[in-house]
Image (cartoon, grey):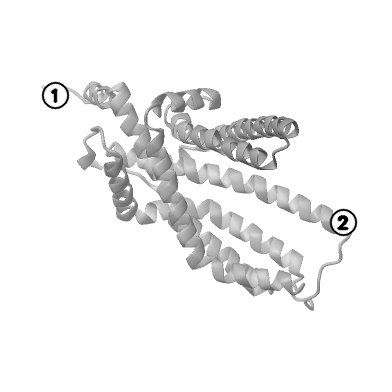
Amino acid sequence: MADLNLRPMTLGEVLDHTFRLYKNHFWLFAGITALPFLLILVCQIALAAFGNGVGQPAQPPTISPGYLGSVMAGGTLLLVLYFLMVGYAHAATIFAVSDLYLARPATVRGSFARVGAKVFRILVIFFLLFLVVIVGIVAVAIVAGVVAAILRSPVLTVFLIFLAFIPALIFFCRTALAIPTAMLENVGAVRSLERSIHLTKGFGSHIFVIYLLAGFLTYAAMLVFQMPFLTLAIKSAASHTPLAFGIVVLQDLGTFISQVLVGPIATIATSLMYYNLRVRKEAFDIQHLMSSLQAAPTTI
């Protein structure tokens, strides 16, 4: 990453360096993403084996309170594990990008070692983002319901609810740098959200383009690695027959591969955007140069 020279970059340059960094250090980023998602894959296969009754004749499961309880408990555990592992992979990728950006050696083990208990800040950030968006959408839905009751216009209600997603999208773009801030500046969840809103002021459209590109790549990977098995799952549900255990495993494996291949790209781009905006707005390049000169040993 020495070619960056800690200079301001355009959005095109950020994306170009994102894919260059991803290509040149593919195994580093794939290894970081694969480790936590491999654990999730094992849990998914174990739950699929439990639900399908591997080694027993295929038959629809008996719906009972015990069965429903076990499914809910397993689903909740898997959801918590998912967000925890996503947080670990996200944070470790950010540290790897930071090391490469600042011309320091980066390894899978070293990147994960720097995360530690900081991963819980990511969970708090996830929760705060979810809370703000849900409260906002519910508030708009209530207003839309009141307006619809007064004007008796269902079309207006749907339109107002649709409009609620626009500020939610803007909010997500403005808070996109919260996790890089929390990790690299070692600040709390609320402070990192405030810092992200400050840094992305005037650059929300850049973040939107990054999210749009990441979404397109995710969709493409899903089509390639998951769609054939999703089609089989839909046909199985329509015919009221359980999906074969082997198909379930292949479906989970396809999800795993697509996550490993596409998952790091958005994180790399937002991490580079974090440094780019700090260079633009806070003269991070000068700060880093001064710190490097002070840390360098003097010779006679």
Query: Looking at the figure, which quarter contains the C terminus?
Result: top left
Q: Nearer the viewer, mark 1 or mark 2?
A: 2
User: How many numbered markers are drawn?
Assistant: 2
| Secondary element at tag 2 | helix
Q: In the image, is 89 to the left or to the right of 40? A: left
Tell me the kind of residue under disc 1. Answer: Thr
Vertical arrangement, residue 240 with respect to residue 252, above or below: below
Dot 2 crowding, Cα within 10 Å, few <14, some 14–19, many 20+? few
Which residue shows up at 32% across the image and 46% down it?
15
Identify the disc placed on residue 299: 1
Q: Earlier in the sequence, mark 1 or mark 2?
A: 2
Vertical arrangement, residue 299 with respect to residue 176, above or below: above
Query: Looking at the figure, which quarter contains the N terminus?
Result: top left
* Label 2 sits on residue: 66
In the rendered image, residue 53, in percent from the top left (x then y), is placed at: 77, 70
In the rendered image, residue 228, in percent from the top left (x then y), is placed at: 56, 71
Which residue shows up at 77% across the image and 72% down it?
240
Q: Nearer the viewer, residue 286 or 158?
A: 158
Which residue in the rendered view is the most extreme toward the left?
Answer: 300
Tell me the kind of residue under disc 2. Answer: Gly
Q: Nearer the viewer, residue 290 or 122?
A: 122
Q: Are marks 1 and 2 in contact (CB under 8 Å)?
A: no
Q: CA distance from mark 1 to mark 2?
A: 73 Å
